[in-house]
Amino acid sequence: MPFEVKVDKDTCIGCGVCWSMCPEVFEMDTKTGKSKVVNKLVKEDDESKSIGVVPDELKDCVSQSASSCPTGAITMS
Ligand code: SF4
């Protein structure tokens, strides 16, 4: 089952850990220097590009990114 991931852009500090660990899901938003979800996984109509719908096979790298994020900005549901 696909799952949802959310990047909280208020708490993200743009450290780069998530897009280093899991570039299939996260990348730097060049406008803000903070994390965003890669375009092909962005949830429909989410203009902020902070919510993604992610296939199960990427769950490990997303959960590792979530636990490594220094500000707890990544949540999964
Ligand atoms: S690991 Fe957390 S703080 Fe660092 S860029 Fe990713 S979401 Fe932002």
Image (cartoon, rainbow, N blue to C red):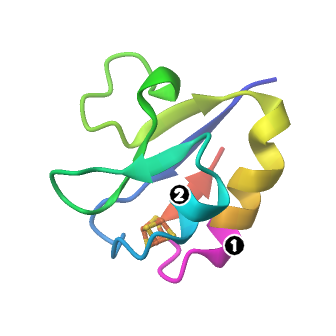
Q: Position of residue 67 (x, y in %)?
A: 69, 73
> Is residue 55 or residue 4 the one in the foreground?
55
On whether ligand 1 comes within 8 Å of the CB at mark 2, the answer is yes
The Cα atoms of the two marked residues, 1 and 2, are separated by 13 Å
Name the residue: 46% across, 35% down. 38
Residue occupying image coordinates x 33% and y 76%: 13
Instruction: Check if residue 34 falls in the magenta segment.
Output: no
Image location of residue 30, percent across then percent down? 22, 51
Foreground pick, 12 / 22: 22
- Magenta span has 69? yes
- Write the start and end of the magenta stretch as one range: 66-72
Badge 1 amino acid: Ser
Q: Which residue is mark 1?
A: 67
Residue count near mark 1 (Cα–Cα under 10 Å), binned few <14, some 14–19, many ≥20:
some
* Residue matched to label 2: 19
Residue with the most extreme top position: 44
- Report the amino acid beneath label 2: Trp
Q: Position of residue 49 (x, y in %)?
A: 34, 36
